[in-house]
Amino acid sequence: MKRLFDILVSGIGLLCLSPLLLIVAIWIKLDSPGPIFYRQVRVGRYNKDFRIFKFRSMRIGSDKGSLVTIGGRDPRITRSGYFIRKFKIDELPQLINVLVGDMSLVGPRPEVRHYVNYWTPEQMHVLDVRPGITDPASIKYRNENELLAQAEDPEKYYIEVIMQEKIKLYLEYAEKSSFWYDIKLIFQTFWVIITE
């Protein structure tokens, strides 16, 4: 039922949002040189790598340094990038990942291999479920970039504090996930986006 719901909603979503996706794609292309999409390798279900679709919000080559971004003062983010990140528009192309089965609408956010390498064997149970576009950790840490901007060492703070808290929430989700809980999280995510 969850997979059928993912296919229907992602397919309809891509169709209905296509005018917005086209406008954002043109804006990104005009705003800075480089591709429209950013295809980063993430770790998916059963510890398998896949390439995630995101609208590019940073300048070319920005991923060669730190993998964490630090809010409004991160010079790597483009002008269009600030806006599409603020309203989570950069995440919309992940509906493609949902449609093809790499991701679900709701599930633990897929992490990059660099950070998964820090996980304990118990934490690796996060990968027993399909990763998602939103989840309880995404809602709680919606201002993650701002928190990192205040840290003396953003990378260390992410690994030792934020990532540990997010993994706890991922594991809790994996234990009590259900279709109706997913629906609730989707509405909570929309509410957070439109009210901030």
Image (spheres, rainbow, N blue to C red):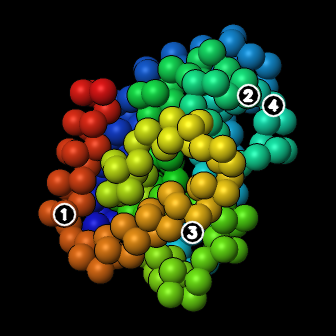
Residue at the location (73% across, 28% down)?
A: 76
Mark 1 to mark 4 CA distance (whole Å): 38 Å
Q: Where is residue 5 in the image (x, y as percent from the top left)?
A: 27, 59
Dot 2 or dot 3, earlier in sequence: 3
Looking at the picture, does residue 24 appear above or below residue 135?
above
Residue at the location (24% across, 60% down)?
A: 182
Looking at the picture, does residue 80 appear above or below residue 94?
above
Question: In terms of image quadrants, where is residue 7?
Answer: bottom left
Q: In which quarter of the image is the C terminus?
A: top left
Q: Which of marks 4 and 2 is in front?
A: 2
Q: What residue type is labelled 1?
A: Tyr
Q: In which quarter of the image is the N terminus?
A: bottom left
Q: Is residue 37 left or right of residue 129?
A: right
The tag on residue 60 is 4
Q: What residue type is labelled 3?
A: Gly
Q: Mark 1 points at which residue?
A: 181
Q: Name the residue under label 2.
A: 76
Dots 1, 2 in contact, CB < 8 A: no
Q: Name the residue under label 3.
A: 44
Dot 4 or dot 3, earlier in sequence: 3
Q: Which amino acid does label 4 sit on?
A: Ile
Mark 4 to mark 3 CA distance (whole Å): 25 Å
Mark 1 to mark 3 CA distance (whole Å): 21 Å
Classify mark 1: residues with Cα within 10 Å, few (<14), some (14-19) or many (20+). Answer: few
Dot 4 or dot 2, earlier in sequence: 4
Dot 1 or dot 4, earlier in sequence: 4
